[in-house]
Amino acid sequence: MKKTEKNILIAFILNISFSIFEFFGGLFTNSVAILSDSIHDLGDALSIGISYFMERKSKKSADNKYTYGYIRYSVLGGVITTTILIVGSILVIIGAIKRLFNPVEVNYNGMIIFAIVGVVLNFLAAYITREGNSINQKSVNLHMLEDVFGWIVVLAGAIIMNFTDIIMIDSIMSIGVAVFILVNALKNLKQVLDLFLEKTPKEIDIGELKKHLLEIDGVDDIHHIHVWSIDGFNNYATMHIVTKSKNIKNVKHMIREELEEHNICHAILETEDEVCDDKDCHVEFKEKTYHHHHH
């Protein structure tokens, strides 16, 4: 079992057992902040479970059905996880707003004890799962850190309520945590959608890349540059190169080296020996046929 997978599995076990413990804690202390956190934790646990299976599947190597391998499954895990978090945080916000209008007595001491346990356990889980570098792993770790953050807020709130008796704080905290989760989840979702829409990876500037490539000896022109990413880490590119050089192998080698500096590890380079004269008038048609071949 790979490290990332093992981390995700450990996170899953910690989270699911903790969310059950927390649910009863919320009932016992009558705190909506703790209850809503337990729902959020349960959501996390489920999504981490999904991540775990997706991550395992994403490690399968390429075959005829999935010629790029199964990497995108890891990304899909991220989508499901993020969706669960978005729905969860919206439900929490609704519940907390209702609670604002009809406050209920809360057991502060119980909350303080729970929050301390919560901070410690979640901090451990976040620490254990911090390594790994798939989007999936990142969203799992993000959950863990959110949980730590959420508990620190609950702890602070419980202590304040203990001294002031302002019950509203419980609901306000709950809303704060939920909004924080919602914003992060939406950011995560955008990242994933960019991948599915084959958007050029954000660290790559095509204009800049082209300028660098045109400086290489023997490269007369370059067009049809496409750069995309499978999982947010591995970038792919295809392009047409016009070269009169006799030593095409060498030109390609230099191009690949330049691409690697731009974090593009897989490139399909097509060479032509004369300037593609019809590229302006047929560009739309060519782009179309080109896409059919490559997607």
Image: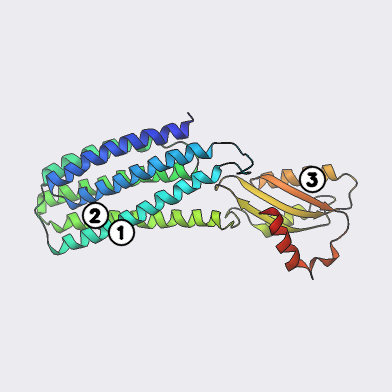
- What residue occupies the far right of the structure in this picture? 246
Q: CA distance from mark 2 to mark 3?
A: 57 Å
User: Would you identify the image quadrant in which residue 272 lies?
Assistant: bottom right
- Check the image and report above or below for 151 versus 278: above
Question: Label 2 crowding class (10 Å Cα cut-off): few <14, some 14-19, many 20+?
Answer: many
Which badge, 1 or 2, comes first in the chain's sequence? 1
The residue mark sitting in front, 1 or 2, is 1
Residue in front for this viewpoint, 85 or 288: 288
Residue 201 location (% of width, % of height): 59, 54
Q: Report which residue position mark 2 lands on.
A: 174
Q: Which mark is residue 41?
A: none
Q: Report which residue position mark 3 lands on.
A: 252
User: Would you identify the image quadrant in which residue 101 lies?
Assistant: bottom left
Residue in front for this viewpoint, 177 or 5: 5
Residue at screen point 50% across, 42% down: 134
- Quadrant of the image for the C terminus? bottom right
Q: Give the left or right position of residue 276, taking residue 138 as reference.
A: right
Residue 128 showing in the rendered view: no
Q: Report which residue position mark 1 lands on.
A: 90
Residue at screen point 15% across, 59% down: 168
Picture mark count = 3
Amino acid carrying label 3: it is: Lys
Residue 64 showing in the rendered view: yes
Q: Give the left or right position of residue 115, taking residue 166 as reference.
A: right
Residue 255 location (% of width, % of height): 76, 47
Amino acid carrying label 2: it is: Ser
Q: Give the left or right position of residue 264, taking residue 24 as reference.
A: right
Which badge, 2 or 3, comes first in the chain's sequence? 2
- Check the image and report above or below for 186 versus 26: below
Residue at screen point 26% across, 38% down: 18
Amino acid carrying label 1: it is: Ile
